[in-house]
Amino acid sequence: MPLSVTRRGAVALLGLGSASLLAACSQSSTSTSGSSSSASETSSSQTSPASTNASTEATGQKYDAGSKNYKGVVPLVDHYESKTYEPGNEEHPPRNAPKPLKPENMNEDSLEGAYATLRYQASVFDYITKTGDLEPLKEMEAAKPDIEYMQSFETFYQNMESSKTWFFDRKFEMDILADPIVSSSKITWRCTETFLNGTKAIIRGEYHDDLPEKYQWTRLTGYVTTEYVNGRWAVTPYVSGGGTGGH
């Protein structure tokens, strides 16, 4: 039976992959066939949400995309706390990651407001992958499932610290694959979400500069829905159309 992967599941897979990496490196095993073993590729029978393309039938409505193209990598927010981020190196893990600041138009009841919310959430996820700090996610009143699955990072960072393990520069990336879809007050975005570990890490106190590709990233493809509720955009938990690991 086809298996659908949730974002929480993908983070679990990422954690398992990292745990496998610890075990592999402790056994001096760094070979890889290029296949995905830590985060196996899955497929899904889920179909696209039944709705209307924002650039067609929704023309003239307040969520009209007009001629704007939202497809592509979602840029992180423009403004952050006044800190100078330092990627990890052989001496220390990443540090001084600045918290993202909310865009001014994030609560605007418009397509731009919904997109600004996605930019902020992507920036928050990127911050969490670097720090394990969930505070910004809780401040934006994220859905409970979102907070629960991102807690995997909080636990993961605690485990890494105790084992003298860190990745030099973990990142998060969202890529919108199609025009936004409008249905009543909801806007749905088909996208990929990628958690990137990079190629360099300290594993149990030892430097590794060429991690096997299967440990470098975990990616999901699916849908994120934004809905304007009580003066802000609520982002529903991720509905996935399949997940893959580095290969």
Image: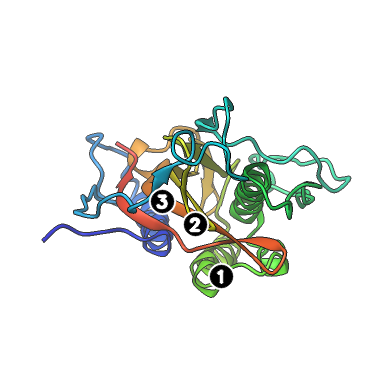
The first of marks 3 and 2 along the sequence is 2
Q: Secondary structure at mark 1?
A: loop
Q: CA distance from mark 3 to mark 1?
A: 15 Å
User: How many residues crowd around disc 2 within 10 Å: few (fewer than 14), some, or many (20 or more)?
Assistant: few
Is label 3 in contact with label 2 (beta carbons under 8 Å)?
A: no
Q: Residue at x 69, y 44 (%)?
A: 91
* Mark 3 burial class by Cα count in 10 Å: few <14, some 14-19, many 20+: many
- Which numbered disc, 2 or 1, marks the residue that appears first in the sequence? 1
CA gap between label 2 and label 1 equals 20 Å
Frontmost residue, 178 versus 88: 178
Question: Is label 3 in contact with label 1 (beta carbons under 8 Å)?
Answer: no
Q: Is residue 216 left or right of residue 133?
A: left
Residue 40 % position (x, y): 24, 50
Query: x%, y% of residue 218?
Result: 39, 46
Q: Is residue 6 visible?
A: yes
Which residue is labeled 1 in the image? Answer: 143
Residue type, numbered disc 1: Ala
On-image quarter of the N terminus: bottom left
For label 2, the residue is 184
